[in-house]
Amino acid sequence: MTFVQIIDCRTSQVEELNRLMDRWVEQTRGKRTATHAVVGTDRSDAQHVVEIVEFPSYDVAMRNSQLPETDRIFREMVALCDEMPTFTDLDVVRDEALYKANARQLFGMLADGTDLALLDGVLAEGYHDHDPTNPQDVLGMDAVRREVEEWRAGFDFAFAVEDQIAEGDRVCTRWTWTGTHVGDFMGLQPTGMEVTMTGTTLHRFRDDGKIAEGWWQYDLLGLMNRLGAVET
């Protein structure tokens, strides 16, 4: 279970505290077990500083606490604070990674027959889509809807999200697509065949959580080969 520690302190030496944290990271390189750390100052009180540190588990966090560098940095941190810092230990029972969740939502909406007007809720108005199987990029919501309609006309399909990695404003999703060829697709009459393909999509998000840009990689040639449209 993911474990989070919240360190709450007051200090008039915020910059020195930041430099202290930098030294801690450098001194514990290769040994520190934290996976993510965020430091923030209170907008209404600049001397109120909060650090949020994430670990894979409580046991892993305790190993980090036992490092000699951690003890030394803690004593230096206390000396910089106006009063003794407080610590809140949390076991994470729910973790909403919103960009990842919005990417998963988009894959579901593409496949489940959702009214395409509702794509405005997850895609930015000027959405820019890069698909190497298209002769030119897809720009804007009208073009996106036409693209989705073409796939829906040709297949009853679903996406299974296999893996997701998020960093900053980007989410990379590895997916498996499964479809039944029920209608005309790129001039190929319906075969009734069930087909699958795998792919990867990288999405860039705006600050409001909407997807502004997407890059797709998938084996369209392999799909058309399985449908009998091309020969390898």
Image: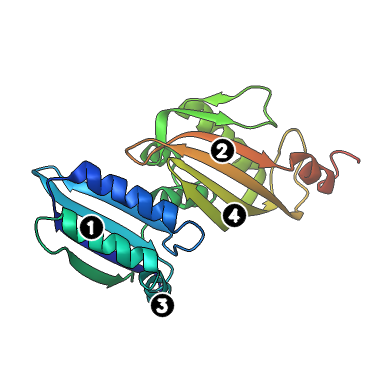
In the picture of the structure, the residue carrying the numbered disc 4 is 158
Q: Residue furthest right?
A: 232
Q: Nearer the viewer, mark 1 or mark 4?
A: 1
Whole-Å distance between the Cαs marked 3 and 4? 39 Å
Q: Residues within 10 Å of mark 2 (few under 14, many from 20)?
A: few
Q: 122 or 112, which lies in front?
A: 122
Q: Amino acid at mark 1?
A: Met
Residue 194 shows up from this direction: yes
Identify which residue is drawn at 51% across, 59% down. Answer: 30
| Residue that numbered label 2 is attached to | 148
Can you tell which quarter of the image residue 63 is in?
A: bottom left
Q: Does residue 162 appear to the left or right of 88 in the view shown?
A: right
The answer to which of marks 1 and 4 sits earlier in the sequence is 1
Disc 1, SS: helix
Residue 16: name its quadrant: top left
Three-letter residue code for mark 3 = Asp
Measure the alpha-carbon separation of dots 3 and 2: 47 Å
Farthest residue in the top direction?
Answer: 136
Q: Residue furthest bottom?
A: 59
> Residue 214 or 46: which is nearer the viewer?
46
154 horizontally vs 232: left or right: left
Q: Quadrant of the N terminus?
A: bottom left
User: What residue sits 16% from the left and 63% below the top?
Assistant: 85
**CB contact under 8 Å: marks 3 and 2:** no
Q: Amino acid at mark 4?
A: Ala
The residue that disc 3 covers is 59
Q: Which residue is mark 1?
A: 77
Q: Position of residue 201 (x, y in %)?
A: 58, 43
Image spot of residue 179 (x, y percent): 67, 53
Rendered position, 138 above or below 182: above
Between the residue at mark 1 and the residue at mark 2, the CA separation in whole angstroms equals 55 Å
